[in-house]
Amino acid sequence: MKRDRIPLILLLIFILVMATGPFLPQWFLFILTLSFATGLVALGLMLLLRAGLVSFGQALYYCAGAYAAGALGRYLKVGDILAQMALGGVAAAILALVLGFLLAKYRGIFFGLLSLALSMILYGLLVKSEALGSTDGFNILPSTLFGVRPGADWVRYVVAVTGGAVALGCAALLHRFLATPLGRLAPAIKDNEIRVEYMGASARRAIHVMYVVAAALAGIGGGLAATTVGHIDPDMAYWTTSGEFIFITILSGTGSVVAPFIGAFIFGAIHSAAYDLSPNTWQMSLGSALLLLIVFLPEGLWSLFRKLGWQT
Amino acid sequence: MADVVLDAKNLCKRFGAVTAADSINAGIEKDSVVGLIGTNGAGKTTFINMITGYLKPDTGAITYQGREITRLAPREITRLGICRSFQIPQLYASLSVEENMLVALGVVLSNGGRGGFFSRGRPLVPGYEAPAEEVAAHILERFGLAAYRERNAQVLPGGVRKLLDIALTMAAKPKILLLDEPTSGVSAEEKFGIMERVMLAARAEGATVLFVEHDMEVVSRFAERVLAFYDGRVIADAAPKAVLADPEVQRYVVGIHAQD
């Protein structure tokens, strides 16, 4: 049997972040941490994509996770990074468990548009709710970890390392999930759902489980994004946010659980560089860069490693 | 009749003006090999579809080991041990032959309550008591598919696709195996090879076999009993020799006009 190198790669990425973090500029740590957050969302989308489903509304769970993390500070005065991520994940998972009863019945474009509609409902609700700051959103408590509030020079590093540990840990868990019988059903459902049923498995139940897992990952990512940025607003649920997540997922490819983080980081880096170079036309620069990546690496960034002869 | 495991009573199914099943009665005995013959549209596949729960009969009942299964969903019927293969192989096209097998064995694991996220080590597949990779290798070997292990299911030759489809069906160790035209679309030389492999595996697993077949040579060689369908009815039900000699069967199914 081929040796499974993914857990080792994830561990190496974590060690790299931990070791180089203190020497990296603050803006770099910021982009890196946000890549862990958006990478988590893309990780969930990758799972759904393996089952042939594209959710155009994953920002719903990203935003729900962020607001849950925000509420934790606003109402309970808790700013712990781990608690924010955990609550974000749990809140998103519960929401997905309920909505999943509806969504797991749908496939293809119907699944996509229904998930988009649900995320826009959340957007609409948040915009209308004065108590949560309406369109302005509200600020997040300063990040703490285990009751300790890191100094201003260290807070980005602490959030990056903690967020990285959680994100890469989630990737390792998802990697394990993909090898379980339930995880193996994802590509089978995509290929031939009728056969899945005739093998004695319930495709709908499997999709419901994967939908909840994907939402939990997005919720954790939302919690991390909230504590990283320090501010949340309804735009986190807006459809363009969902679009970015899909973009990252397609860019990354479905080959490995490492890919979404690399894709998220490259997306974040291109995004920042484009904005820095030409604040007025950054969408065009971003679009061109992504277009090139898609033309030359149609199976996503991960296929680059395969082309270089890596066995993953 | 001794030891009837699967019993269809008075099954009727109409699609608009077409009668696909017209009071079909058939008791299938344990360990028997039953061939289903008939022209296209005679009701053979409808019969199989009703047994496996894809179609619900308008009237009538199907019992399996004394339990009524008429209204169950396909996956529930599969879990009881009634499994079918398909006339057009239903594979997971983007996966390799081995991965196809691992999906099938994964379902067997899940339905046996094993192989969950929190289980430790490599779970043992119920009925085989070995890890899925080993079981997959064993099954592929048995069906002569070992050489195709890493090949993508989409690019397999016709006969291999057919065998893989049946191998996937047999992964769950069915008590009753329903084969929908196991040798259709396969070259004449390959037909007997495929049937021999499948029958050998079915016998080893102790499965009762029902198969739909158009090739009368295959039917007379492998079936112990033949049900001949015509216009939604069973017009003959006996040993192959007797059925194939029946004038009605010759006229409507085999296509030889009896000399009056």
Image (cartoon, rainbow, N blue to C red):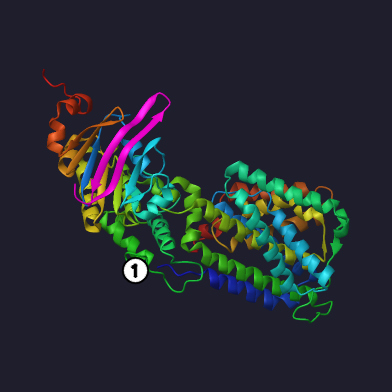
Quadrant of res A218: bottom right
Q: Position of residue B56 (x, y in %)?
A: 41, 39
Report the label total. 1
Above/below status of A87 relative to A22? above
Relative placement, left or right, of A195 versus A299 is left
Query: A26 or B210: which is nearer to us?
Result: B210
Residue at 34% x, 36% y is B11
Assign the magenta stretch its main secondary structure. Answer: strand
Of residues A44 and B256, the one nearer the viewer is B256
Magenta region: which residues? Answer: B1-30
Q: B72 or B255: nearer the eye?
A: B72
Q: Is residue A16 magenta?
A: no
> Up-down: is B173 above or below A193?
below
Report the residue at 37% width, 45% height from top: B52
Who's the residue at 40% across and 35% down the image? Answer: B58
Residue type of the residue flagged with mark 1? Ala
Chain letter, disc 1 residue = B
In the rendered image of this protein, does residue B208 appear above or below residue B113?
Answer: above
> Which is nearer the eye, B127 or B147?
B127
Residue B66: x and y in percent read: 31, 51
Residue B92 visible in the current orientation: no
Looking at the image, residue A151 sits to the left or right of residue B209; the answer is right
The percent position of residue A255, horizontal first and vertical second, equals 54, 58
Among the 4 quarters of the image, the one containing residue A150: bottom right
The reply to whether residue B232 is visible in this rendering is yes
Q: Judging from the image, what secondary structure is the residue with disc 1 in?
A: loop
